[in-house]
Structures are given as structure tokens and as C-alpha cells.
Amino acid sequence: MSGQAMPCSPQEIASLFLFEKLSPEQLGRLCAEGRVERFEAGPVYTEGDPATCFYVMIEGTVVLFRRVGGDDVEVSRTSQRGVYAGAMQAYLGDRVPQTYTNSMRVTERTRFFVLPAQSFADFMQEWFPMAAHLLEGLFFGAKNTQRAIGQRERLQALGSLSAGLTHELNNPAAAAVRATATLRERVGKMRHKLAVISQGGYSRETIADLIEIQERTVERVAKAPVLSPLEASDREDELTDWLDDHGIQEGWRIAPTFVQAGLDTDWLDQVAATVAEDILPAAIGWLNYSVETELLMDEIDDSTTRISHLVDAAKQYSQLDRAPHRVVDVHELLDSTLLMLSGKIGRRIRVVKDYDRSLPDVPAYPAELNQVWTNLIDNAVFAIGSTGGEGTLTVHTARQGDRLLVEFRDTGPGIPADIRSRIFDPFFTTKPVGEGTGLGLDISWRIVVNKHHGSLQVESEPGDTRFQVLLPLTAPETQTEVETGTESEAGTESEAETAEEPV
């Protein structure tokens, strides 16, 4: 957009803090290559357009906006003379994209000193060569540092997840190994018992009865009810008494197995009525081995199923062999992340899943959302750990208009009000040196806002901190990925004095 051209006065330009130290000759060159323009209320330039001009406000009011999803979000509003915006990185040349990183409007008649981007770059290199080199170093050094530490943080997270996954896999794997060894022993004893029965001179009908009883017993194992500890103890006493009364040795050792298999005294009465009294002990021993082998096979099945479930969760978390962008069920992503982090969460933190399962799937980059969940859960665990390690982590999902809410709520000490506005800044962390990079929330913000066109916000008070992720339920018509480098907004006098890039 262009405004109405007006005379450029070197004396007026010199009154702006950016130019107050320039010589008369330099001020003259500024007015010769630049211009003063007056804009009526309305837009001045638009985010994403080629950055052709550097603007310094002489008088009026400017408002800067960023495009987030389908909305323009106001990021700055000021009437301070001398604030600047526009082609602020022109001195870097084609090493970075030279586009406007925000949109600027004026809310009243406003005058700017406008300098073409190339002239701004030439003046920076000619008049302030050392400052230009320092600014280049700060810009690229910050980006390289951010990239390196971001990679390190991802590797640290991967190491933590790998350790947790190894721990989670070890338990069912060890259980399967133990059950297999015990099963081999029980099958050996069952073969021995079968040999004893076959040599006992029993009739074909008796052996057929034993096999039928075995089959029906196995069916009972598959349908065994879950008993409370008190119920199980009472039934063990009943079975022990029955076995003792019928001359079965070490009935106290057999009874717990029968109880676990869902057998009771009524069942044993049926067994006793089916076989002769002289072979009852052998029949009970045979059934005991049958029950034990069935229970051991159930344990192996449970353990291997658990291992398969963990491997599936790891694939779901890492999104191996999946499209980078697709429609997903966020609950599947949350569950896989919670499972992967279960070792880190520990048993002292209670996890509550408050899911609205009626929510539709959403378009997303699932692997990157899992990174967001990881960062937010990790922060919640750290917060709860700072108060003794016991607390509650609640993961809540709900619908809010045309967006899906994912909220992580912890019972930690809360975020102090004086640092709450800084927690999304790169490299800002409250963790001890070596434990945090300060990029977790910055990366999360960029993934949610820039890549998913959503929002990430926090509400906090002692005992109740909530990080809220809002994701669009539908993909925007034109989906573009936003550059994740340092963003530039309107500069102020104090920012100019410290030679830092305004943010």
C-alpha cells in the first residue's frame, strides 16, 4: 500500500531515536533516498508480501497482526514516535526470505518515514559495518543454537522414551520367559502323570472320562471369574478342606490353582462322581497339571499381547510408515504418548483420562502433535515432582465451537505470574541447568500455532495449571507452513538501544 507523499525534513527525521546520532550529511541522504508518507486509517502492508520498505513512525498509531489459522491476531499496538517495522532484515540479503512477517494497519491518520529495503541494507552496511556483522551473528547464531539445542532436546526425549519403553517391554518379556520355563516343567510332569495313568490298568471308559473332565475343566479356566482377595481366600479354604476330606495330599498347595481357574467344591463333587474313588487322587493331580498349563499359556498370551501393544504404541507415537499429514483420532495419539511416558510418569502420579470420545478426527501432523503432548506431559511431571512427586495429571478433551480442545492439567505448584508471559520464549526455562533447554514450549507453540493453525495457552494457579491446545476441526482451505525462525514485530527505543531484534 502507498500513502500520500509529503516533504521530508532532516530536522524532523533527526528527532526520531533511530536517527538522532546521525550526521547532517547522513540525514540528508536518508531524506534523499527515503520519503515521508501519510496513511489514512487502514492497511499499510500485508504479511507474506515481499518486504520492500522499512517504516519508522513519525506520528499516529500502528497495530501489528499475525495470521493464525483463519484469524488476524493482534500482537502489538503503539503510538510511540520512532517505532519501526517492515523490512528489518534487509541487511541479511537473500540469505533469509525477505517478506513481511506481520501485517501492519494504522488506526488514525499516521505519518511514516519510509526507506526502500535496499537503501536500508546499504546504509546498514556502509554506516554501521560492525553493528551489521554483530546483528548477522546474533541472527544466524540464535537460529543455529536453537536448531542444535532443538535436535538435542529431541534426542534426549528419544532416549528417555527408549528407556521407558525398554522398561515397559522388559516386564512382560520376563513374565513370558518365566511362564515358558514353568510350562515346560508342568508339561513334563503331565507326560509323567499320563504314563502312570496309562500303566494303571484303567479301562478305556475311565481314561475317556478323565479326558472329558480335562476338556470341561479347561473350558472353566477360560471363563474363570475375578474374585476379590477375601472371596479367593474363603474359596481356597473350602477347596483345601474338600481335598483333605477326600485324601488328596498337599491340598493346600493345589487349592489356590483351582481357585484361580474358577473351580469350586461343586465342580470337584462332579469329578468325584465321575471317576472311581481309587483313581480320584490321580485324576485331581492330572487336572491340576492341566489347569496349571492352561493358566501359564494364558500368562504367555497376556505377556506377548502386552509386548505387541507396546510395539504398536511405539509405532503410533513415532508415526512410522504413516503419512506426515492425515486425519487422526487425537485420543490414539494421547494414549500412545502416555504409554510411552508411563515409566517417566511413575506410579506416584495418578493419570486421569477425561476424554470426549464423540469428538471427530482432525487433520494434523500426528508425529509433531505427539511431540507437543510429550513436552506438556514432561512439564507436568516435573511440576508435580517439585512438590514431592505425588499428584494428578488430567488429560481432558472436549469440543469448543469449531475447534477441539486438548487440556493437560496438573496439581503442581503453578507458574508464578511474573514469568507466565515468558514461558513460551525460546531458551527460557525454570528447570535446573542441564535439565531443560527452554525450547520445549517454544517448539510446542510453533507446532500448534504455525503448523496446525491452532492456539496454545496456559492458565495457572497453585495446585491447578492447565495447558490448553485448541486445534481446528477442519483443515484451512490453503494450508501453508509458516517459517519457524525468529519473528520480528514493531521495535521500540529500548530495543534499538540494546541492538536486539525486536520481538
Image: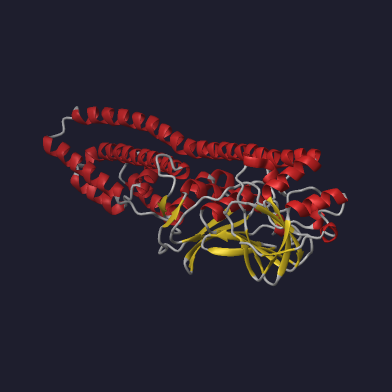
Decide if residue 35 is on the left or right side of residue 304.
right
Location of the N terminus by quadrant is bottom right
Q: Quadrant of residue 6?
A: bottom right
In-front residue for pair 179/290: 179
Residue 292 percent coordinates (x, y): 34, 39
Give the residue displayed 85% in from the left and 49% down from the top: 25
Decide if residue 174 is on the left or right side of residue 153.
left
Give the residue displayed 42% in from the left and 63% down from the top: 359
Location of the C terminus by quadrant is bottom right
The answer to whether residue 427 shows anywhere in this view is no
Residue 425 percent coordinates (x, y): 69, 51
Q: Is residue 230 above or below residue 111?
A: above
Give the residue displayed 75% in from the left and 40% down from the top: 125
In-front residue for pair 181/263: 181
Residue 198 percent coordinates (x, y): 19, 29
Q: Residue furthest left?
A: 204
Q: Is residue 453 above or below residue 365?
A: below
Q: Is residue 375 above or below residue 204?
A: below
Give the residue displayed 54% in from the left and 40% down from the top: 161
The answer to whether residue 480 shows anywhere in this view is yes
In-front residue for pair 242/16: 16
Decide if residue 26 is on the left or right side of residue 196.
right
Colour option used: secondary structure
Residue 76 percent coordinates (x, y): 69, 63
